[in-house]
Structure formats: structure tokens, C-alpha cells
Amino acid sequence: MVDFVKSGKVVRLVAVVLAIAVAFLVLWPFYTVPTGNRGVVTTFGKITGIEDEGLVVLPPWKKLSVFSIRAEQADIEDAEGSTSDTQPVKVSLTVRYSIATDKVAEVYEKYSHNGDLSSYVQTATQEIFKAVTARYSAPDLIAERAKVSADINDALRTKLAVYGAQVISIDMRGFAFSPSYMAAINEKVTQEQLRLVAENKLLTVEAEQKQKVAIAEAEASAVRAKADGDAYANLKIATAQADALKVQNAALTQAKDVLELRRIEVEQTKADRWNGVLPAAIYAGAPIPFLNVEK
């Protein structure tokens, strides 16, 4: 009988301990918010607070939901748009975003209980891509791709701010038009390159011709200058020679009597020196010595 009583007490004690353990587990007040998250505290379904990372102690009538504010990624494949000149265009984008810390309660209440807004980001990105590409013609969309990307980035930041998200980065890839349009673009580029080559060749030929003309003109100028120089030099020489002849003629005219006097003096000297002996032979044309009859 005593053993039965003792065993009954043990059973009751074990039951009490189990009940306390179960109650403690059910009413456990300690929670943890992991790094890169926020804790959303609700009381009977109503948001009553936002907890930072770390240990959180809550009464049993409150609930803690872990909400991620880490960077998330949304992949948008083959987003379609149309340019202002009605050319269809496709692109694939990767958008990295995160929930703004001051928007956690709003996002939890309206859009997501865990911080995943990928579906909203995909829809918004496709809408923004269509709106931006519609403002550009196809050639401008190719030539101003960096500006197009910046426009998409700015518009998407504004759009996602409505959902409490902030854009970290946007990667745009696979930017392409229809095959027929790309073929036309390639053909146009090829023709433009050929045109530039032809223009450059023409400019080269024109430059070479101008160079040849300049060289020929320079050579002709040099020849003319040399001819003019030679003619001038010849003229000066002829003038000098003529002047010299004039001077000589004048001198001869003025000195005719002097020359005759000199000739007579020479003949007189010869006569004074003659010894009176005639030469044994006189050749034709030889002068006959002057004879002094008085001696």
C-alpha cells in the first residue's frame, strides 16, 4: 500500500515537471534576430514594433517574424520594348535591391512578410524598360546606351521606392533588336565604313595632287627666277661691255694725234739708229729704211 502511494506521488511529480516544461517551451520569451534582418513584432496580428538584430524578449501574446533587409536579386529575362520608330527591342536585366530599414513595417504590412519583392521588381523593371525605350529611336538607343541605362536606373529607383525598396545596382545585358534590323544596321555600318574609306582615299589623292602642283609651281618659279637672273646678268654684262667700248672709242678718238706722234717718234728712233747700210735682200712687203740724204 505504501509503495503504491509512493509510486503515485512520483507519477504526479513527473507530470507536473512535464507540464512545466511544456508550458515553458510554449511560453518561451527569448528570441533571436539574425544579422541582416529585422524582427517584426505583432500583437494579435497587428504590428507593434520593429526589433534590431540580436536577442529579443517577448511576452507570450506577442509574435516575432524575421524580416530580411539583405540585398536581394531579381532577374528579368527578355524584357520587351519598342523604340519611338517602332523597332522592337529586347534586353535582360539583373536588379539588386534591398528593403529600406525605415520601410520594414510598411513592406511587411503591404507587400511581403520576409522582404522578398522580386515579383514587384520584375514587373516594375519591365514597365520602366518599355517607357524609357519608347523615348528613343533605334539608332539613338544604340548610340546612347549609357544614357539609356542611366534613365532606366533613375526611373526604377523612383518606382521601387513606392514598395519600400532601394536599388543597389542594375546590370543590363543581351541588348538586341530584331534580326532583320540588326542585319540592316550591320549593312549600314559596312557602307558607312566603305564611304569613309573612299573619302579618305579621295582626300589623299587630292592632297597628293595639290602637293605635286605646289612642287611644279615652285620649280617653275625657280626656273623663272633663274632665267630672270641670267637675263639680268647678261644685260648688265652687255651694258658694261658696250660702255667699255664707248670709253675705248672715245679714248682712241681723243688720243689719235698722240698715237701718230708716238709712231713718228718710233720711226725717228729707228732712223737715228740706222747705219746707212741697206739690207742685202729685201723681201716683198718689208719696209725700206729711211735714208738720210743730208749725210
Image: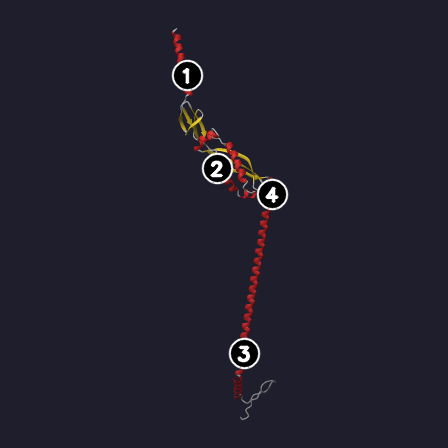
Where is residue 1? Give x, y as percent.
Answer: 39, 6
Residue 250 visible in the current orientation: yes
Where is residue 188? Give x, y as percent.
Answer: 59, 45
- Nearer-N-terminus badge (4/2): 2
Q: Which residue is mark 1?
A: 19
Q: Which residue is mark 3?
A: 246
The answer to which quarter of the image holds residue 19 is: top left
Residue at horizontal 50 percent and vertical 38 percent from the top? 155
- Nearer-N-terminus badge (4/1): 1
What's the image's color scheme? secondary structure
The kind of secondary structure element at disc 2 is: helix
Answer yes or no: do the residues labelled 4 and 3 have beta carbons within 8 Å? no
The kind of secondary structure element at disc 1 is: helix
Residue at horizontal 59 percent and vertical 53 percent from the top? 202
Q: CA distance from mark 2 to mark 1?
A: 55 Å
Answer yes or no: do the residues labelled 1 and 3 have beta carbons within 8 Å? no
Q: Which residue is mark 2?
A: 158
The kind of secondary structure element at disc 4 is: helix
Neighbor class of circle 4 (other Cα within 10 Å; few <14, some 14-19, many 20+) is: few
Q: Which residue is mark 4?
A: 184
